[in-house]
Amino acid sequence: MNHVSYEEWVKYVNNEINDNVREVYDDHLYSCDQCLELYLQAVTELESSLPVLSNADDFTNLVMADVSQVKKKLPEKQAPFYQRTSFHYIVAAAMTLLFMTSGVFQSITKYAGAVETPSIDESPPSMTEEIMNKTFAWIDTFEIKNREANK
């Protein structure tokens, strides 16, 4: 859409245009910063001629009441079927049945058994290592007994 002239925005502010054109201008204001600036200039210039609210709180309450009534009247939009939880459960159950009947789970158990068994075989320590470990342990206990006796 082409940009709206300043004179048209003055007519818009003074409510001198029909409802169809007003809707088009409303939509255009959301997407065009240049026209929004012109609209704000028109509102600022014509601010003194616009009606003054005698009680702003009552006006706000009336608007909020109308908004809540409109909200109650609007039907709730339901999510598409593929975004519902029940759809996801059904898909998961169908995939489980498919995997069970095709034997995928049986082939996985073969790999799981290989993962569970350790791949590194630890050999028992040699006789020399055992003798050295026992000797160090015996020396450590001998040193502990000497410390306790000296105290």
Image (spheres, rainbow, N blue to C red):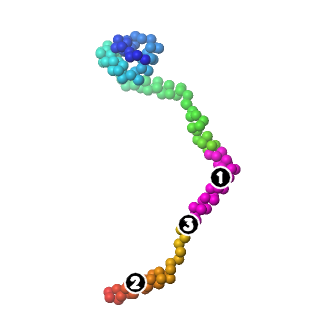
| Amino acid beneath label 1 | Val
Work out whether residue 55 or residue 2 is closer to the camera in this orientation and state it: 2
Above or below residue 29? Residue 127 is below
Which residue in the protein does label 1 denote?
104
Q: CA distance from mark 3 to mark 2?
A: 34 Å
Which residue in the protein does label 3 denote?
118
Which residue in the protein does label 2 denote?
140
Give the SS element for disc 2: helix
Residue 76's label in the rendered image is none
Q: CA distance from mark 1 to mark 3?
A: 24 Å
**In the image, residue 6 lies at what x, y percent?**
34, 14
The residue lying at 58 percent from left, 34 percent from top is: 80
| Quadrant where the N terminus is found in the figure | top left
| Quadrant where the C terminus is found in the figure | bottom left
The residue lying at 63 percent from left, 59 percent from top is: 110
**In the image, residue 31 lies at what x, y percent?**
41, 23
Specify the farthest residue to the right: 101
* Residue 147 shows in this picture: yes
The residue lying at 46 percent from left, 26 percent from top is: 67
| Amino acid beneath label 2 | Asp
Magenta span of residues: 92-117
Find out whether the residues at labels 1 and 3 contact each other: C-beta distance under 8 Å.
no
